[in-house]
Image: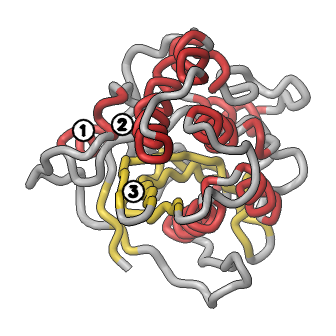
Amino acid sequence: MSDASATGTVADDRDPARSRRGQRRAGLVLVTTGLLALLLTGGIVAALADLVLDGGRGIAADDDAPDAATSDTAATARTALATAPMLDLPPAAAAPHALTTRTAGPPVALPAAAPGDPLATRFPATPEGALAQLAELMRVGMAGGDPAVWERTYDAVAEPGAAPAAGTWTGRDLVDLRRGAGMSVSGPPPEGTSISWTPTAAMVKGTLDGGTYTVACVLGELVVENRGRVVTAGWGNCLPMHRTGDRWLVAAGPTAALAPSAWPGSAEAVDAGWREIRR
């Protein structure tokens, strides 16, 4: 793959208003938290109104601004790639709905790594290796929907200077998700409830620096089960990954722009560029 290649779909309208994207992401979280609240308590809690009104709360730190501490050409190019907006999808696209027979391209084969405890690392020095590391980070870090688990897992594979876990889209969304569902912000989910995320699709937004810098994106199915009742939604995330030694680490600099979240296998997922994962 050549430098600065882009296999994901980037929106033509690169609106710099971060609050608008925050409101759209808040809409996704609203859909999921509303379902969670219904599942766990039988009613939507008042916190959901705050989530709708305060769309900016879901904004990841420095999402659209270049890192002022670094001004060299390579850093500028990385920032531009990481923060370029991707396809805008409505929140309803993440809810379960009809699938399509179309594809965005051939399946993505993710390489395996020796099992870790709890996080597998040392994936190959390829774009697919970066995708595999991100998929593993998301799988482990999303367990229980706990922001504290996300932070520990993220920190284990983040290089110095990377955006803090709490400043990523996933970190902030998990806080909003639990608050909106009436759950404690941190800790295991309520008794009888499980929250998990399973990778289903992926794409490489682009690569730089001879393939050592890759903005990787993964889409998965978020599953919340409570005493036999299940809520599901599509949940996507992108992160900049940097090859350091024999590992892919979350790269220093700003976090990646908002990933398009869609129900895996739907027309919206294909339009966004998501390709099925094959292992």
Q: Residue furthest bottom?
A: 114
Element type at mark 2: loop
- Would you identify the image quadrant in which residue 158 lies? bottom right
The quadrant in which the C terminus is found is: bottom left
Which residue lies at the image location 8% right of the left edge and 55% below the top edge? 101
- Would you identify the image quadrant in which residue 75 lies? top right
Q: Nearer the viewer, residue 120 or 160?
A: 120
**Residue 257 placed where, x, y %?**
57, 33
**Residue 210 placed where, x, y %?**
62, 57
Query: How far apart, in angstroms, are the residues tagged by discs 1 and 2?
Result: 11 Å
| Disc with the residue nearer the chain's start (1 vs 2) | 2
**Residue 174 placed where, x, y %?**
63, 43
Q: Nearer the viewer, residue 63 or 24?
A: 24
Dot label at residue 221: 3
Element type at mark 3: strand
Q: Nearer the viewer, residue 277 or 197?
A: 197
Q: Which residue type carries mark 2?
A: Thr
Which residue lies at the image location 22% right of the left edge and 53% below the top edge? 265
Say if 269 sits above or below 55 in the image.
below
Dot label at residue 134: none
Q: Is residue 145 left or right of residue 201?
A: right
Q: Is residue 32 visible?
A: no
| Disc with the residue nearer the chain's start (2 vs 3) | 2
Q: Which residue type carries mark 3?
A: Glu
| Disc with the residue nearer the chain's start (3 vs 1) | 3
Which residue lies at the image location 80% right of the left edge and 73% below the top edge? 245
- Circle 1 residue: 268
Q: Which residue type carries mark 1?
A: Glu
Query: How far apart, in angstroms, are the residues tagged by discs 3 and 1?
Result: 15 Å
- Circle 2 residue: 9
Disc 3 vs disc 1: which is toward the camera? 3
